[in-house]
Image (cartoon, rainbow, N blue to C red):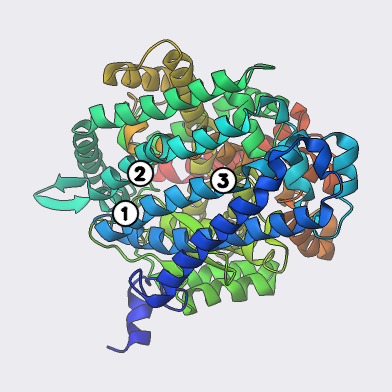
Amino acid sequence: MSQQEASSVFPPVWNNTHIYPSVDSAEFGSAMVSLKAGIETLSQACKYFDAPQGAHSDAAELIGELLQNASDAKATLSNLYTFVSSLTSVNSCDESAHEIIAQLSSLEAKLEQAEKPLVLFLLRAPEDVISKLLLVDKIQPFTYEISHGRKNSDQMLSQDQESMLSGLAVDGLHSWGRLYDKIEGQLRCTIDSTEMGVADAANLLMKPDPQVRKSAWMAIQKAWGGQAETSAAVLNALNGWRLEESRWRSHTRDCHYLDTSCHQSHIDRQTLDTLMDSAYQCRDIGHRALGVMAKSYRQAKLNPWDVLVPAPVLHHEEQTTIPFTDALNLIAAAFSAFDPEMGDFALMMGEKGWIDARPSENRGGGAYCDEFSVPREPRVFMTYDGNLSNVLTLAHEIGHAWHSWVMRDMHIAVCDYPMTLAETASIFAETLVLDALWEKCENDHDRFHIAWEDAHSAATFLNNIPARFEMERSLVEQRKDSELSVSALRSLTADAWNKWYGDTMDGADEYYWASKGHFSISSLGFYNYPYLFGYLFSLGIYAKKDKYGDDFVQLYRDILRDTGRLSAEDLIQKHFNEDIRKPKFWLDSISVVESGVKRFENLADRILDKR
């Protein structure tokens, strides 16, 4: 079988050799040497800003040069990280790659320490000084980064303390995140006498056979149960570190953990509160979807192993597997109907080896999109098993990739968009595919499968994601007083599920805090609510498509290109003159969700009673 024929049958793997041939290559080694030299040069140059602030008000050219040098170093560091992470994603047992990640983490801390005098100067300088500096051509690309950072300037520590914090985090905060990643990649499950990694086992949770799902879920529970104490230690360490850091940063005003998260997400705290309040007010929409899904399987309620349940096989239907190439072509066609260049881009992702989706031993879980900075090329990772949910995950991640692709000609300083706005592009892409699939449906059975995905999204985003947020917030609050035991974490999870799922689920996934890696990411707390934000934010934008007609494609691109240089509030105000701090925007978006659930309910009424 030729390579071309093989790629049409099996999911692809990455081809990153033009970036670096290997971690042992001269090219990789040269990049490491260059990065270290760049950090040392930057460190010496930035010492100029150790002197009192007044001495630097006329150092505009130097500041512009150093900002660019720091940006270049970060791009090299990002390239190295992306390359090595691609190795550990497909094989978590790659010890040499893990060792290099630890080295890169140390270099990242040294880079932060090197630029710290300059960063602190820019954060603390008088407003009139900053206003003049931002008029300088070399500094203008960094305008939003500087302005956004200055919002929390009163919570900065001294230069020595900030440098010490960055250094200690390498073998403190971030070592716990690395430990979790290694455990997740190496964890094994045994299902019906077959041993597999947790990524492969998780795909079985999307099978129509209830017994297969239950067996997979029980095996995953057993595997993570064996790592429960370690997983609890990870969560306690991560959140204990963050709380202690917040305590030190509260020297002028309270540094609340949610305010910190909102700052990282480039949203106001009021926006987050309004978002969560709106979701809680409308959580019954997700409940309705879950009720129909349970009825479809002739169950009174769904079980914890049914969270990813697919549409059931009805009547004469047979479960179908969608070959990867068919999935990619389907996605490309859906994208092309909206924006031809977007469709061409999806095909290019596959042709150039920018997607890795083939199951592999010791493979990491989940799916993500990353990118190389030089050259500006995105990468997608997932484990493809041929079901419709996998197709939508692939569309989701390619949506992320398209987001970065339309920004590739922009200065890298304005391309660092937050997770809240990142999820907008991915969910927009999913919606395009679902709409395209709906248009192709020939009968109610086909429509039921598509409507199921809409209903599943409603339950995921209005119930599951908020339950994760609820659990994490409770965890942080209790961590203020003491470390939490495994039983306490299980109890918090059960309480959160009860609050958001109500009586629609027969029990809770009490090890979700361990098995869901989003809770153990060292660089970012409260990783989950941005998915709800992106879901509703994206639907709100998508609903305006018909209103703007042919102008909408360019409008959408403009929105994506603004995500790294505007807050979420300013972005939607600029392009649609709406205020996302108020409930109306979110409730309007939720009304779109409810329309999908109603459609699902109506189809179920026509189909299920005829079984």
- Say which mark, if any, is on residue 212: none
Which residue, given by chain and number where applicable, does mark 2 sit on?
178
Q: Find the distance from the CA under tag 1 to the CA under tag 3.
A: 21 Å
Find numbered disc 1 in the image and state the secondary structure of the residue it sits on.
helix
Upstream in the sequence, badge 1 or badge 2? 1
- In this orientation, which residue lies closer to the viewer: 401 or 140? 140
| Relative height, residue 598 to residue 10 (above, below) | above
94 horizontally vs 269: left or right: left
Upstream in the sequence, badge 3 or badge 2? 3
Q: Amino acid at mark 2?
A: Arg
* Quadrant of the image containing the C terminus: top left
* Quadrant of the image containing the N terminus: bottom left
Q: Amino acid at mark 3?
A: Glu
Circles 3 and 2, Cβ within 8 Å, touching? The answer is no
Upstream in the sequence, badge 1 or badge 3? 1
133 horizontally vs 168: left or right: right
Q: Find the distance from the CA under tag 3 to the CA under tag 2.
A: 19 Å
Callout 1: 10 Å neighbours few (<14), some, many (20+)? Answer: some
Residue at image point 56% right, 71% down: 346
| Relative height, residue 561 to residue 183 (above, below) | below
Which residue, given by chain and number where applicable, does mark 1 sit on?
98
Residue at image point 89% right, 52% down: 135
Residue at image point 31% right, 45% down: 205
Write down the quadrant of residue 148 in the picture. Answer: top right
Find numbered disc 3 in the image and state the secondary structure of the residue it sits on.
helix
- Say which mark, if any, is on residue 112: 3
